[in-house]
Amino acid sequence: MSGLLALLDDVAGIAKVAAASVDDISVAAAKAGTKAAGVVIDDAAVTPKYVTGFEPARELPIIWRIARGSFINKLVFLLPAALLLSAFAPWLIPPLLILGGSYLCFEGAEKIVHVLMPHDDHSGGPDGSHDIGDPMHLEEEKVKGAIKTDFILSAEIMVLSLSTIDNPSIWIQAATLAVVGIAVTVGVYGVVAIIVKMDDLGLWISRNAALGLTRALGRGIVKGMPWLLRLLAIVGTAAMLWVGGSIIVHSLHEMGWHMPEDAIKGLAKSLSGGQGFANWAAIALMDFVLGFLYGLTLIPIGTKIVAPLWAALFGGAKAKAH
């Protein structure tokens, strides 16, 4: 009888430890998800462009293919890499964050410049957006481009999440990153699926609803979707620059260069009085401006040096594959 009681006591102790671990994981995942929210917004805003121009029947399959690639990015490649990084080279995390933030600033600034100074581009682009001869080939290139973009954004999400986990246990870190990765992927691509099918839903309502008011609502959804997609593009670009700028400033602070973050916080406090949302908005605006200005300096580097080098290294292999 005493042995049974001892066994039950051990089981109860294990249960308490497990419950505490689950609580640690949930708290860490919530904290990490909040930290990565800006990148998540950007991911959700950027992805719909990859399914525009296709037949409605292909939209959800394309989103599923991109989402599956995102799961593989996060859980197969990035999660083990993040754990190895945390265990053996934690000093590399801030420089990697700066590299990812630089990419976001470059992308956001380039989009703004392209809108302000549009020009014809027949290069095809990394996502094959100008190659419209073969719909299946275009779909393949779009999916590949989306997964590549997702990899960079997912890397930012996973590294940002890792930087917020205080628990040294590798199992807690792994479980937290897995929870964040799954939740973010389901959330982002679930929202994207809803967005890209809203016009089909509006069209169905406008044709099948019994009430005139409901049919008018359906027509309003159809007419409003292009504006919503434009708004998402604007939000996505702004999020890129804001998140990129904030990542770089915070990472520099972690590396010992405190001046940029201290200057931004000091100026924001003087403008807002250090009050709640106003203070946050002032910091976010300065991070956005900094990200845009930094991104402008990266455009010639990216277009004149990095892109040709990338094409020289991988363009030949790609051409042979086709």
Image (spheres, helix red, strand yellow):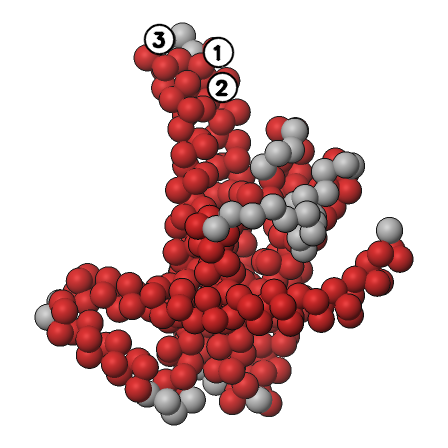
Residue 128 appearing in the image: yes
Residue at left 63%, top 48%?
121
Nearest the eye: 64 or 249: 249
Residue at left 53%, top 39%?
193
Residue 104 screen position, x and y as percent: 49, 64
Q: Which residue is mark 2?
A: 203
Residue at left 53%, top 75%?
99
N-terminal label among 3 and 2: 2
Label 2 to label 1: alpha-carbon separation: 6 Å
Quadrant for residue 253, please give it.
Answer: bottom left
Residue 41 screen position, x and y as percent: 43, 54
Quadrant for residue 78, please give it.
Answer: bottom right
Q: Residue type at mark 3?
A: Gly
Residue 216 screen position, x and y as percent: 36, 15
Label 3 to label 1: alpha-carbon separation: 10 Å
Q: Which residue is mark 3?
A: 212
**Above or below: residue 158 compared with residue 209:** below
Residue 183 appearing in the image: no
Q: How many marks?
A: 3
Residue 46 screen position, x and y as percent: 51, 50
**Above or below: residue 225 compared with residue 274:** above
Label 3 to label 2: alpha-carbon separation: 14 Å
Q: Residue type at mark 2?
A: Leu
Dots 2, 1 in contact, CB < 8 A: yes
Q: Residues within 10 Å of mark 2 (few under 14, many from 20)?
A: some
Quadrant for residue 170, please give it.
Answer: bottom right
